[in-house]
């Protein structure tokens, strides 16, 4: 029976997907390791060893990409976890308009990063933007959200949180809804209050949901390109460049070897941060 | 008791109103701002205010955006539609087949898991991918971008399908085998129809991703005749300078398809994203 069974699960079924995935994704990724060590014009290449990587690490305008990519991903993850959890707790309480509110929080997820970026670029206008007008209205000074080199990357990260908090929220809602009602009843019998319910039931038992939000936001954050490109283009200067936007700039200037070295660095960057987090989280989830 | 309950319901009402106000402030105001300014004249829109327009320029603005550059936006909608539809078709067929075999042959799947995960996390290597596309003569062509988008969505779709196939009892395959089904008939006539729920989830989620894709279109599908919807916006900011009214009209137009999708598939999108996320 077993031999027959395996005949039913023919290897040929893997071929179409396997070929597409290999030719258009895995193979270029493998080749990037080689071409990152070349001076490359697409038609011609010359082996130059680690020179591209040295250029990358020595040039301040390129090195800033590491810091910004980490800042961006870190801010986005923190913001989405905290806000997503708080909104999810609110939307699983006894309020009656939770479906409407969930839709309002969720709709930006459906809008492309480039459209959100174009819109927030205008909302954050230094003199006329409505965010600054709002701040002035309550007596706060205007902020140069995208023009201040120290602030630009955080303004983009804030916009990313605005756009992505909807996903975090629905994942947290699913996690909180899956908590058995017995726990809450037991707490109620013992006379616990809402804060204790959050601290001792919701927070520990929505850990799987939190892990999911962290890993999704982390991967998205490390790879982010669209939003940075739409809002600042990496500017002012290079102050808000992330790895993905540096790769684009090198590519657009015709430095193909350098751009490919950037891709290899991004590969290791994502792999060294996301894979361990992913493994750690998966192990934890089995214990629960 | 009833006084306590009344106090409770008052508190709930206050929470409902506060929640609505905060949601409208953070999410409603930007949406309203874009919509109302897309209907103003360009001088009025340049003031970036929330006020009501002095004259509604709805037809003029949207008409100009649609006809600009010899109807580039319409061409972009056509291109995006072609890419989205064919990517989804290809993705559904090849991923469901692969995931079926991967789910049934447990031993082999273990080694391939990591290869699949790589595609979920690692972004494509830009220039080597262009090099491969050029080598195959597929750079800047529909088949090229469709194959590429399929390859980039493969991991996500495959993981969702595999998890679903695992819930279909193996006895079904054995019964089909006894009835004289071959592998192709078993899959396409018996298994594939059973995958319908997860198929529709993947259709909706992947359409959103492909339609909203900017980065890959910019790299792998360049050229003015290859315009796609997200790139029209990118061209706009330079083209119209400070014509915010036209920029916002363009934003609204390219958001409409996904917002319609959201209205019809709200539950499926949300459940799909949570299920996909938890398993991914």
Image (spheres, coloured by chain):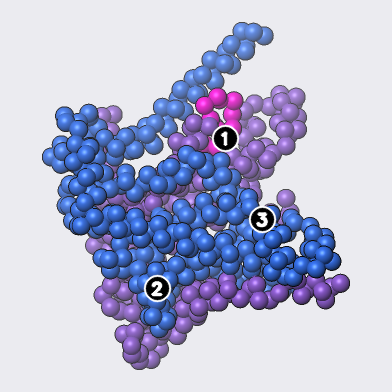
Does residue B189 appear left or right of residue B73 in this picture? right
The residue under label 2 is B126
Q: Give the colour of chain B.
A: blue
Instruction: Give yes or no for residue A87 being in the magenta stretch.
Output: yes
Tag 1 subunit: A
Helix, strand or loop status at disc 2: helix
Tag 2 subunit: B
Label 3 packing within 10 angstroms: few (<14), some (14-19), many (20+): few
Q: Is residue A263 visible?
A: no
Question: Could you confirm whether marks 1 and 2 are on the same chain?
Answer: no
Give the distance between the C-alpha atoms of the residues marked 3 and 2, in whole angstroms. Answer: 37 Å
Label 1 packing within 10 angstroms: few (<14), some (14-19), many (20+): some
- For the record, the magenta segment spans A86-98
Helix, strand or loop status at disc 1: helix
Label 2 packing within 10 angstroms: few (<14), some (14-19), many (20+): many
Furthest toward the bottom, the residue is A46
**Callouts 3 and 2 close, C-beta under 8 Å:** no
Q: Residue at x 49, y 74 (%)?
A: A25
Helix, strand or loop status at disc 3: helix
Give the distance between the C-alpha atoms of the residues marked 1 and 2, in whole angstroms. Answer: 41 Å
**Badge number at residue A89:** 1
Q: Nearer the viewer, residue A175 or B183?
A: B183
Q: Nearer the viewer, residue B173 or A231?
A: B173
Q: Is residue B249 above or below residue A35?
A: above
Nearest to viewer (mark 3 / mark 2)? 3
Instruction: Give yes or no for residue A260 being in the magenta stretch.
Output: no
Q: Residue at x 41, y 60 (%)?
A: B82
Q: Residue at x 39, y 51 (%)?
A: A112
Does residue B206 appear left or right of residue A257 in this picture? right
């Amino acid at each position: 029976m077993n031999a027959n069974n395996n005949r039913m699960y023919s290897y040929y079924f893997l071929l179409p997907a396997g070929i597409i995935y290999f030719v258009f994704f895995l193979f270029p990724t493998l080749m990037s390791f080689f071409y990152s060590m070349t001076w490359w014009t697409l038609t011609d290449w010359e082996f130059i060893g680690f020179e591209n990587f040295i250029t990358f690490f020595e040039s301040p305008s390129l090195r800033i990409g590491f810091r910004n990519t980490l800042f961006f991903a870190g801010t986005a993850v923190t913001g989405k976890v905290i806000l997503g959890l708080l909104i999810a707790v609110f939307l699983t309480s006894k309020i009656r308009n939770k479906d409407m509110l969930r839709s309002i929080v969720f709709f930006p997820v459906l809008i492309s990063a480039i459209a959100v970026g174009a819109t927030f670029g205008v909302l954050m206008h230094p003199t006329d933007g409505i965010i600054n007008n709002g701040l002035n209205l309550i007596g706060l000074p205007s902020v140069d959200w995208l023009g201040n080199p120290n602030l630009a990357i955080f303004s983009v990260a804030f916009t990313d949180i605005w756009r992505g908090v909807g996903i975090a929220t629905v994942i947290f809602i699913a996690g909180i809804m899956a908590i058995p009602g017995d726990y809450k009843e037991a707490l109620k019998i013992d006379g616990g209050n809402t804060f204790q319910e959050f601290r001792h039931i919701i927070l520990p038992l929505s850990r799987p949901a939190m892990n999911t939000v962290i890993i999704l936001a982390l991967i998205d954050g490390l790879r982010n390109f669209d939003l940075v490109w739409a809002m600042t283009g990496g500017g002012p200067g290079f102050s808000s460049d992330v790895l993905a936007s540096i790769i684009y700039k090198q590519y657009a200037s015709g430095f193909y070897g350098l751009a490919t070295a950037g891709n290899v660095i991004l590969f290791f960057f994502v792999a060294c941060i996301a894979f361990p987090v992913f493994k750690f989280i998966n192990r934890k989830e089995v214990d629960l | 008791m009833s006084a306590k309950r009344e106090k409770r319901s008052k508190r709930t009402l206050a929470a409902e109103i506060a929640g609505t106000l905060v949601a409208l402030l953070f999410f409603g105001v930007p949406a309203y701002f874009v919509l109302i300014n897309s209907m103003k004249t360009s001088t009025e829109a340049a003031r970036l205010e929330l006020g009501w327009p002095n004259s509604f320029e709805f037809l003029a603005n949207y008409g100009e955006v649609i006809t600009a550059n010899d109807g580039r936006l319409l061409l972009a909608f056509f291109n995006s539609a072609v890419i989205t539809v064919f990517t989804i078709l290809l993705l559904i067929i090849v991923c469901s087949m692969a995931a079926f075999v991967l789910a049934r042959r447990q031993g082999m799947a273990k080694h391939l898991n990591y290869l699949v995960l790589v595609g979920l996390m690692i972004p494509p290597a830009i220039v080597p991918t262009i090099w491969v596309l050029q080598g195959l003569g597929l750079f800047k062509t529909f088949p090229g971008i469709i194959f590429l988008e399929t390859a980039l969505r493969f991991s996500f779709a495959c993981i969702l399908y595999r998890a679903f196939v695992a819930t279909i009892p193996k006895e079904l395959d054995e019964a089909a085998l006894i009835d004289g089904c071959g592998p192709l008939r078993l899959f396409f006539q018996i298994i594939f129809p059973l995958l319908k729920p997860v198929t529709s989830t993947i259709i909706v989620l992947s359409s959103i991703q492909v339609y909203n894709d900017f980065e890959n279109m910019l790299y792998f599908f360049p050229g003015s005749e290859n315009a796609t919807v997200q790139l029209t916006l990118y061209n706009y900011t330079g083209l119209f300078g400070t014509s915010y009214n036209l920029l916002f009209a363009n934003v609204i137009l390219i958001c409409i398809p996904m917002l319609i999708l959201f209205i019809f598939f709200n539950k499926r999108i949300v459940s799909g994203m949570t299920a996909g996320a938890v398993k991914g």
